[in-house]
Image (cartoon, helix red, strand yellow):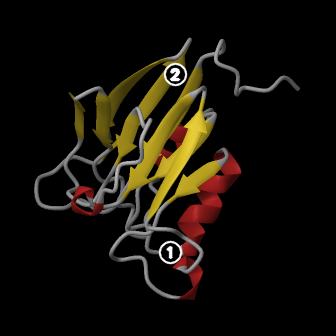
Amino acid sequence: MPSRSTKAEALRIGLVSDTHDLLRPEVADWLRGSDHIVHAGDICGEAVLQALAVLAPLTAVRGNNDLGPWARHLHEQETVRLGGIAIHVVHDLKELALPAGVRVVVSGHSHRPLVQEREGVLYVNPGSAGPRRFKLPISAAELRIEAGRVTAHLTSF
């Protein structure tokens, strides 16, 4: 099977956050087919991580609600390189320690979906894919990486 990690091939990176121990079937279906999944914290249960890892390789960070033995292996921040693009993941942007060379920051915590470029860095908050909070949408996001370029798109459920 050919590798999907070269710069020349298009990659789809599924982004989720704030599942709060609920992986909705429609979110899981939408993530299916991703080349990689990134979870930006507040997972709140090992079963969510296990279900996501079945769908695609997974990078996840610990959020403020990720407590207990199951979460001890999760770091507060991670950087992963996919398709030649450095993607840094942190739950709460207030805790961001931005490494040099990062092109994308994926965060969560606010439950507010956002795609915004600032000073050459693309910031993506996929919003909350778990229980509804206030009147905020249930949402996720994706990164598309192709030929060294990256774009982000939000999806509501």
Q: Is residue 31 above or below residue 8?
A: below
What quarter of the picture does the C terminus occupy?
Answer: top left
What quarter of the picture does the N terminus occupy?
Answer: top right
Residue ID at (56%, 45%): 80
10 Å crowding of disc 2: few (<14), some (14-19), many (20+):
many
Q: Which residue is mark 2?
A: 145
Label 2 sits on what residue type?
Ile
10 Å crowding of disc 1: few (<14), some (14-19), many (20+):
some
N-terminal-most mark, 1 or 2: 1
Q: Residue furthest left?
A: 135
User: Which of the 4 image quadrants contains residue 131?
Assistant: bottom left
Badge number at residue 45:
1
Please tell me which residue lies in front, 71 or 135. 71
Residue ID at (63%, 34%): 35
User: Which of the 4 image quadrants contains residue 132?
Assistant: bottom left
Residue 37 in the image, given as x and y percentages of width and height: 55, 44
Residue ID at (23%, 29%): 119
Residue 16 in sight: no
User: Which of the 4 image quadrants contains residue 100?
Assistant: top left
Q: Secondary structure at mark 2?
A: strand
Residue 30 in the image, given as x and y percentages of width and height: 49, 37
Q: CA distance from mark 1 to mark 2?
A: 29 Å
Please tell me which residue lies in front, 27 or 49. 49
Image depth: mark 1 or mark 2 in front: 2
Residue 157 in sight: yes
Label 1 sits on what residue type?
Gly
